[in-house]
Image (spheres, helix red, strand yellow):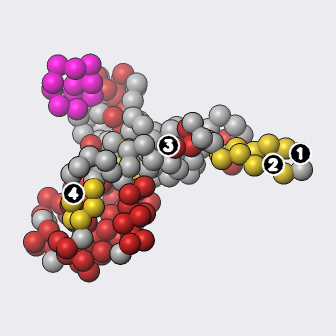
Amino acid sequence: RQRLERVLKYLLDENEFLSPYGIRSLSKFHQSNPFVFHVNGQEYRVDYLPAESNTGMFGGNSNWRGPVWMPMNIMLIRALQQFYLYYGDSFKVECPTGSGQFMNLFEVSKDLANRLITTFTREPATGTAQAGRRPVYGGNETFQTDPHWRDLILFYEYFHGDNGAGLGASHQTGWTGAVAKLIQLYGMLDEKRFL
């Protein structure tokens, strides 16, 4: 229990792994504190990069170095559900870390699922510049505003760790399409029906 609390403190921290669109693969802490190491006189660094890489290392994209990956997030949601089945309402954590808001692990899993889902949904019509825009399409005006394209949903390989924009291949219906299952699951269940 104590180890899980310690892990979740970092996982649910918006200055570390928790983004508005899911869990990042690498902590945002490394944006200002890169991990640097030297081998044979050569310096290597692991920075937090919210989108594409700035080097050719690892194939030239930032795979695992900051972006949000749907399969990793789905596995975390499933683990949180299992821990909720074990601990029930007796185990609550602060979510997000530092917010003063405490949730049981089912509620945390639902919050994480909602973050993933909002990647694809339109921002509420609040009069802001982002109103009616889908985070998944970032600055792509055709997909954001063209009536012939704006309702077509692409399932990107991974997502920008800070703004949710889709990155990589746009036909990942296998793992990214699993967001539909999250919509279905949390549309049907609450924590009482889950037990």
Please report contact status of discs 3 and 2: CB closer than 8 Å, yes or no.
no
Q: Is residue 188 above or below residue 47?
A: below
Measure how far apart labels 3 and 2 are at the Cα level: 22 Å
Q: Main secondary structure of the magenta part?
A: loop
Q: Is residue 121 magenta?
A: no
Q: Residue at x 24, y 65 (%)?
A: 92
Quarter of the image where the N terminus is located: bottom left
Measure how far apart labels 2 and 1 are at the Cα level: 6 Å
Q: Which label was assigned to residue 102? A: 4
Q: Secondary structure at mark 4?
A: strand
Please report contact status of discs 2 and 1: CB closer than 8 Å, yes or no.
yes
Disc 4 vs disc 2: which is toward the camera? Answer: 4
For marks 4 and 1 on the same chain, the one whose residue lies earlier in the sequence: 1
Coordinates of residue 193 in the picture (x, y in percent): 10, 73
User: Which stretch appears magenta?
Assistant: 123-133
Q: Residue at x 21, y 51 (%)?
A: 101
Horizontal side of 55 relative to 176 (left or right) equals: right
Q: Circle 2 sits on which residue?
A: 38
Q: Is residue 191 above or below residue 60?
A: below
Residue 173: in sight, yes or no? Answer: no
Q: Is residue 126 magenta?
A: yes
Q: Which label was assigned to residue 13? A: none
Q: Secondary structure at mark 2?
A: strand
Residue sitting nearer the eye, 96 or 42? 96
Q: In the current view of this chain or complex, which residue is farthest to the right?
A: 40
For marks 4 and 3 on the same chain, the one whose residue lies earlier in the sequence: 3
Q: Circle 1 sits on which residue?
A: 41
Horizontal side of 48 relative to 35 (left or right) equals: left
For marks 3 and 2 on the same chain, the one whose residue lies earlier in the sequence: 3
Measure how far apart labels 4 and 2 are at the Cα level: 42 Å
Q: Amino acid at mark 4?
A: Phe
